[in-house]
Amino acid sequence: MTYKEALDYIHSLYWRGKKSGLEKTKELLDLCGHPEQGLRCIHIAGTNGKGSTAAMLESVCRCAGMKIGLYTSPYIVRYNERIQVNREEIPDERLAELTEYLAGVTEQMEVPPSEFEFGTVLAFLYFKEQQCDLVILETGLGGTFDSTNVIEEPLLCVITALGFDHTAQLGTTMTEIAEAKAGIIKQGVPVVFYGENPEGEAVIRRRCEEKGAPLFLPCSEGLTSEYVGSVFQNQRFSYQRPEKEDAKQQNTKGCNWEHVELSLPGLYQQKNATVVLEAVEQLRSLGIVLPEDAVREGLRTVFWQARLEVLQSEPLILADGSHNPQGMQATVESLKQYFPGRQLQFIFGAMADKELDVMIPMFLSLAKKIYVTAPAMPRAMKAEALCLECEKNCDATIQPELVICKEAKEALSLAKQEAKDEVIVVIGSLYLVGEIKQIYTKK
């Protein structure tokens, strides 16, 4: 196979053999000789912050001298982004070779795997041959029936912030969503949970008790933001969890980090970083050597795209893939902090199945002008319909100028022409961010 043929084959699997459960992933792994066995994994689920948390953990462990496999989704520009070793994407040639091999194996299956199931097994094959010291796995959707959940004995499970997203698949209540995420919890395996969600926390605690899994949560009172600069500068924070005995939380050891620099912008990333610091403590207790200098360097230099990512400095263009209410709220709070009192220009596109009536009012009051467009995806809401959704939320005090653009390229071009010293924010969809980033990549 050529690289293009490999991608065409992988994407063709999307509509074939869709069925919830782990049976097909397990069958494919069995046919491949179980490449996942022997890999030391950290398994990450959650609604928001999975990718950022995975990137921070990867950076910390890599700075400690380990060879780290990283599996994330979705990709933003290139499929290869999903499978990385030490932040190097799987080479095109190797992706094509492994796809050709795996395509042959799938011919033995009565029902073919889905695209995500195929990609997960491909990642395990690559991580195995690369002899990774540690693999960080991000779930694609939920947890219980996510294909990454074939890992039976991870070193550590991490559950990031919970919120409402993918409700058609995961359920419409927080209890149902938390139960899906809690499906990654394994017998006796430590769990680090973001917290700040009482209903979801009750589910996580119950599952941990059932599985005899120690549960650890960051101490919210222990996070202090010392300095927040512009989006061009690292932010700095301190985090302290006092030593105490708490049978419910099971945090009995102190954790003290002062003046930690974090390269990822956004106030919400500080809380994600405390989850990472809690994970560091648990990994250390399992015998993994993570020196303080490596932890600090990992957080100081980590990069993760599509989260208030700076695409251009003059005019300033930021890209943020927030696509659910919790993520949008976190992004808007950071924009208010970075640009107090300023009105911004937005390039906005979204999928039709998102909670737009909740998301749109969050950023509308910050908007001077909104270029409304539609990502090139079947699920995307048409620009005209999305513009109507924006108009519904305008009133006498909130009346940004709305401009309908047929595609992302047109929206970016118009925004740059009129921006001058304005700030432009791409928002609403990871697919939209991917299309905008692709324009920059092709330059």
Image (cartoon, grey):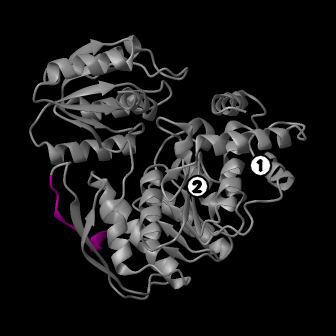
Q: Residue 181, which numbered label?
A: 2
Q: What x and y, as percent, mark residue 414?
A: 24, 16
- 256, 392: nearer the viewer: 256
Residue 248 appears in the figure: no
Q: Residue 350, which numbered label?
A: none
Task: Give, as a single range, the part of the protein colored magenta.
Answer: 220-229
Badge nearest the viewer, 1 or 2: 1
Q: Is residue 205 left or right of residue 374?
A: right
Dividing the picture into quarters, in which one does residue 118 lie? top right
Badge 1 vs badge 2, beta-carbon distance below 8 Å: no
- 112, 85: nearer the viewer: 85
Q: Is residue 189 left or right of residue 403?
A: right
Between the residue at mark 1 and the residue at mark 2, the CA separation in whole angstroms equals 18 Å
Please tell me how crowded label 2 is: few (under 14), some (14-19), or many (20+) other residues with Cα within 10 Å: many
Tell me which amino acid carries mark 2: Lys
Task: Using the image, determine if residue 50 lies above or below residue 210.
Answer: above
Quadrant containing the N terminus is: top right
Task: Using the image, determine if residue 17 lies above or below residue 375.
Answer: below
Q: Which residue is mark 1?
A: 25
Tell me which amino acid carries mark 1: Thr
Q: Residue at x 75, y 47 (%)?
A: 21
Q: Magenta stretch containing residue 228, yes or no?
A: yes
Q: What x and y, as percent, mark residue 342?
A: 10, 35
Q: Secondary structure at mark 1?
A: helix
Dividing the picture into quarters, in which one does residue 155 lie? bottom right
Q: What x and y, as percent, mark residue 236?
A: 21, 65
Please tell me how crowded label 1 is: few (under 14), some (14-19), or many (20+) other residues with Cα within 10 Å: many
